[in-house]
Image (cartoon, rainbow, N blue to C red):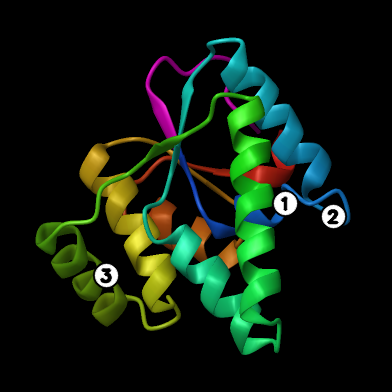
């Protein structure tokens, strides 16, 4: 279940960005989260590597670079409408922690391990629709919420 009110930040990751598209099944949940953030219930913090993961995913699926640029710009515009433009920072410490998490939890992808390490480093909840990431976050003592709960 989603929290009623969180005063600090909440880290969102790549599925959140893809959910900005009205065609994505997560879209209604993403909009609810953005609306709650816009009301000041919490600050959304986007994982620093999520834009890169979006770009790599699009290109790996055969999307042209020009179209990938358009998609990223549309995502940025959608976030700006809700004044959601804070990003977590990427540091050597976060990457080191992420590799340790990936070593411990082999099911984590590199990007998911960085999302989790960022949430852990910032000591804030993680919001994701990824079942593996939710389970591992909770095992690691990181407060985690299913994006579909919003």
| Proximity of marks 2 and 1: CB atoms separated by less than 8 Å | yes
Does residue 23 appear to the left or right of 102 in the view shown?
right
Q: Position of residue 78 (x, y in %)?
A: 68, 38
Say which residue label 3 marks.
Answer: 101
**Nearer to us: label 1 or label 3:** 1
| Figure check: 13 above or below 102 | above
Say which residue label 2 marks.
Answer: 25
Element under label 1?
loop
| Figure check: 31 above or below 22 | above
Which of the two labelled residues, at mark 3 and mark 2, occupies the earlier sequence position?
2
Per the rendered image, the range of residues in magenta is: 1-10
Q: Nearer the viewer, residue 86 or 109?
A: 86
Q: Position of residue 64 (x, y in %)?
A: 68, 82
Q: Position of residue 137 (x, y in %)?
A: 41, 55
Which of the two labelled residues, at mark 1 and mark 3, occupies the earlier sequence position?
1
Element under label 3?
helix
| Proximity of marks 1 and 3: CB atoms separated by less than 8 Å | no
| Figure check: 74 above or below 38 | below
Which of the two labelled residues, at mark 2 and mark 1, occupies the earlier sequence position?
1
**Nearer to us: label 3 or label 2:** 2
Quadrant for residue 113, please give it.
bottom left
Does residue 62 appear to the left or right of 145 in the view shown?
right
Crowdedness of circle 2 by 10 Å Cα count: few (<14), some, many (20+)?
A: few
Label of residue 19 in the image? 1
Task: Give the spatial CA distance, label 2 vs label 1.
Answer: 7 Å
């Amino acid at each position: 279940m989603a929290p009623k009110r969180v005063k600090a930040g909440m880290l969102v990751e790549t599925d959140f960005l893809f959910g900005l598209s009205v065609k994505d099944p997560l879209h209604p949940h993403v909009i609810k989260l953005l609306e709650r953030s816009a009301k000041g219930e919490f600050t959304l913090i986007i994982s620093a590597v999520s834009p890169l993961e979006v770009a790599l995913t699009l290109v790996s699926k055969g999307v042209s670079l020009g179209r990938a640029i358009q998609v990223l710009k549309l995502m940025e515009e959608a976030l700006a409408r809700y004044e959601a433009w804070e990003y977590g920072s990427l540091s050597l410490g976060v990457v080191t922690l992420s590799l340790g998490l990936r070593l411990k939890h082999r099911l984590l992808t590199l990007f998911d391990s960085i999302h989790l390490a960022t949430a852990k480093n910032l000591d804030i909840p993680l919001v994701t629709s990824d079942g593996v990431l939710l389970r591992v976050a909770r095992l690691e003592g990181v407060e985690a919420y299913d994006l579909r709960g919003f």
